[in-house]
Amino acid sequence: MERAIAASKASEERNRSLPAHLVVCLLIAMSLWSRDSMRDVLKNLVDGMSEAWVHVGKYWRVPCKSAITQARQRLGAEVMSRLFYELVQPMATDETLGAFLNGLRIVVIDGTCFDVPDSDENARVFGRPSSRPGTVAAFPKVRLVVLIEAGTHIIFDALMCPYRIGERVRALKLLRSVKSGMLLMWDRGLHSYGMVSSTVSQGCDYLGRIPANVKFICEKTLEDGSYLSYINPSGKLRKKGCQPLLVRVIEYTIEHPENPAEQLTYRLITSLLDIEKFPAELLAREYHQRWEVENTIDELKIHLLGRKTHVRSQKPREVVQEVYGWLLGHWSVRVLMLQAATSASVPPLRLSFTGTLRVIRRAIPKFQRLQAEEFPFFSIG
């Protein structure tokens, strides 16, 4: 936190009742107590320190709403983004059950949208979804694309953008965080030659679903029923020198979840060509770990921020600031769950996210009963 504040030049020259360190903690805690006002969140955050303050004969008055808003504006958004990118990373180890497939760390990429408050500034920067002629969508929306570790639900990279920018565009940029030793999964909406080419150039393996309208010519049938083919670049990319890429295609059917008599056909492409180490049946079964990203988004939007409008801020810069606090709040809960699961030798996904969140809310005041000289976030006066 000190490094992020210093690098963002958000340090302060005089003591304040809301120093930068406390505002950072407040922004993260806003996701833990999402239904409370900012003043109430601040009270929850410092509640356990009241006993220590009594012993030293001091009292800290909770600032008003406008003072909290001004403190957030002083802090800016860069501190939170720097803190996020310095802290978050894949954290599963070899002992983490369900996080690897034959030595490859399973990671998933996907996107979602969420509402932001209806203000002129937010509408101008983030935009609104289209609606019927003569009507306007109720809220501006922000698009968020995330990269998660499937075995822990830890979001280790994320990008937000205006609603009008599609998921594919941001997903390509998010590939900056994949590397050798990972197996990246994506859904059919993200399928493209660019996704395959960019993933391979990072040294990362992939397993992605193909849209129904995309056809592949069978070049060679393999013993497990999968076959080899090529994915071709678009005419524009071909002019730039891009070449067809060898892929392995896996086709299988599953029962329709609503009509067991009906069959759904899935088609996957992958860079994993070793059919002995990665047989088609194994990859078809493991691909459905892609849905862990949907569960992660559900944790973010339903369990962590159970609000109609997930973000409170009326201005775009504070929206960005708040979203990074939101992501750090989710990271904090998931890291604690990983530590607890590791000590108990159980998969992290066996633990309850909402149960852990309740434990954290109860525990925060207990961990604030510090000695007077241990107060790092306050200038008490």
Image: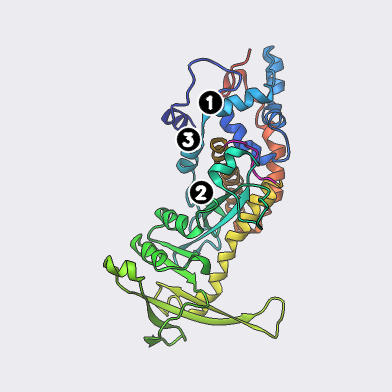
* Residue 5 in picture, x, y percent from top left: 47, 29
Over which residues does the magenta segment extend? 309-315
Q: Are marks 2 and 1 in contact (CB under 8 Å)?
A: no
Q: Amino acid at mark 2?
A: Cys
Q: Amino acid at mark 3?
A: Glu
Q: Which residue is mark 2?
A: 161
Q: Which secondary structure dominates the residues rendered in magenta? A: loop
Q: Earlier in the sequence, mark 2 or mark 1?
A: 1
Q: Which mark is residue 132?
A: none
Q: Work out which quarter of the rendered image holds the C terminus and state it.
A: top right
Residue at 54%, 71% (x, y): give it.
286
Q: Where 136 sits versus 13, above or below?
A: below
Question: What is the crowding at mark 2: few (fewer than 14 residues within 10 Å), some, or many (at least 20)?
Answer: many
Q: Where 107 sits versus 212, above or below?
A: above
Give the CA separation, mark 2 to mark 3: 16 Å
Residue 356 visible in this rendered orientation of the protein:
yes
Give the CA separation, mark 2 to mark 1: 23 Å
Q: Which residue is mark 1?
A: 74
Helix, strand or loop at label 3? It is helix
Residue 187 visible in this rendered orientation of the protein:
no
Q: Which mark is residue 78?
A: 3
Residue 295 shown in magenta:
no
Residue 311 shown in magenta:
yes
